[in-house]
């Protein structure tokens, strides 16, 4: 599915099927698992709480989760900013561990029973503590390493401060204000009534992953949404309509530093990609997506597939030159 939404017109189209057995076509309005695009939402609430004076991005992790911080290597040094900008060095529980233990999510590729297994946020963090080793010292100059564990810790802090389950917090602070009527954070195996297409890991699509337990992503990647809703989110976010202070979004974008491909820079849960697009990418065990906006031109791009391995994850980089050829974007800076 591809959406390009400009102030003048919207292009929305789909190719392929939602089920390789029935060959039912993939519909444009079908909901999908947005994966790590969820991080933009977790980071948005983090910035809202900072505006309210209930936390500072430079707070140490130990201020909010002292028991867990005491168990994490370098836990006394790690700050919330480092967790949100992937500069904490904390091991990502989704990766295969250095002690040989298959990572949560990665392990499901070799053991189908792990696909449907549910986890609590604490269990996800404990996996990283028990089996992983730090990638580098927190805030080490020039170092950047993507870590889902960091965003689970941020989700736990958000729940502790706001006193509700994370899904309720997202609904109150983001989904309702932005008019996102078809979006939710889900913490289990998706139900049939959600209308998701069948999901597959990769070609030749022998491994169906529709029953992936989304608790394995949680604050790092467990939101279900639609292209229309995600376009609304990107516009509300970049226009500052989810914040009290108009400058907060800029602080979010500029709150980190240089990053690795596919990002040029990475701030607080959001990155800059080629051509000046701002956004994220997402991957679950059955979906791949790229979601971004070119703020100056108000052009939103959303691409997703119901397979976990595809070029959708770098969609913005492919589409941006086409948009420039169509003179929808200004000349690259």
Image (cartoon, rainbow, N blue to C red):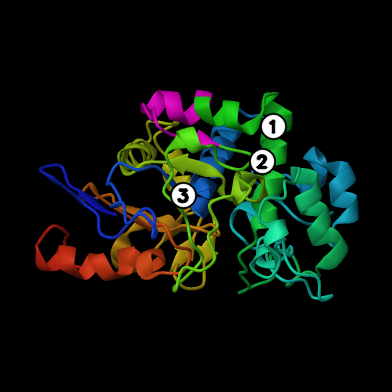
Q: Give the residue at mark 2.
A: 155
Q: Which mark is residue 34?
A: 3
Among numbered discs 3 and 2, the one appearing first in the sequence = 3
Measured in 3D between alpha carbons, the distance from the residue under mark 3 to the one under mark 2, in whole angstroms, is 17 Å
Quadrant (top left, top right, bottom left, bottom right) of the C terminus: bottom left
**Quarter occupied by residue 115:** bottom right
Q: Position of residue 61 (x, y in %)?
A: 77, 47
Q: Which mark is residue 135?
A: none
Q: Which residues are magenta?
A: 172-185
Drawn side of residue 314 relative to residue 126, left or right: left
Nearer to us in this view, 287 or 26: 26
SS for dot 2: helix
Q: Give the residue at mark 1.
A: 159
Q: Are marks 2 and 1 in contact (CB under 8 Å)?
A: yes
Q: Position of residue 119 (x, y in %)?
A: 75, 46
Q: Who's the residue at 17% across and 67% down the image?
A: 322
Residue 174: in magenta span: yes
Drawn side of residue 126 relative to residue 29, left or right: right
Q: Who's the residue at 13% across and 57% down the image?
A: 328
């Amino acid at each position: 599915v591809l959406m390009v939404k400009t102030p003048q017109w919207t292009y929305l189209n789909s190719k392929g099927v939602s089920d390789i057995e029935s060959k039912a076509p993939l519909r444009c309005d079908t909901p999908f698992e947005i994966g790590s695009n969820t991080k933009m939402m977790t980071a948005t609430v983090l910035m809202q709480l900072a505006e309210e004076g209930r936390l500072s991005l430079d707070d140490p992790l130990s201020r909010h989760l002292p028991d867990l911080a005491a168990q994490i290597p370098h836990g006394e040094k790690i700050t919330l900013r480092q967790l949100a900008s992937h500069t904490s060095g904390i091991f990502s529980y989704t990766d295969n561990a250095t002690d040989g233990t298959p990572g949560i999510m990665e392990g499901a590729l070799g053991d189908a029973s792990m696909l449907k297994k549910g986890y609590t946020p604490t269990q996800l963090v404990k996996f990283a503590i028990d089996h992983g080793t730090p990638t580098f010292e927190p805030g080490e100059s020039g170092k950047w390493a993507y870590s889902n564990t960091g965003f689970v810790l941020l989700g736990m802090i958000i729940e502790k401060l706001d006193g509700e389950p994370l899904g309720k917090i997202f609904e109150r602070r983001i989904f309702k204000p932005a008019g996102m009527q078809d979006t939710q954070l889900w913490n289990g195996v998706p139900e049939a009534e959600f209308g998701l297409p069948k999901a597959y890991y990769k070609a030749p699509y022998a491994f169906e992953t529709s029953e992936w337990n989304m608790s394995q992503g949680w604050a790092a990647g467990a939101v279900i949404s639609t292209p229309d809703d995600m376009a609304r989110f990107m516009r509300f976010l970049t226009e500052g309509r989810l914040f009290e202070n108009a400058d907060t979004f800029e602080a979010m974008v500029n709150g980190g530093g240089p990053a690795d491909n596919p990002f040029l820079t990475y701030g607080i849960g959001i990155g800059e990609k080629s051509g000046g697009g701002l956004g994220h990418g997402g991957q679950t065990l059955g979906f791949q997506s790229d979601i971004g906006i070119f703020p100056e031109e108000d052009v939103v791009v959303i691409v997703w597939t119901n397979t976990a391995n595809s070029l959708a994850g770098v969609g913005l980089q492919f589409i941006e030159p086409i948009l420039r050829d169509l003179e929808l974007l200004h000349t690259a800076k």
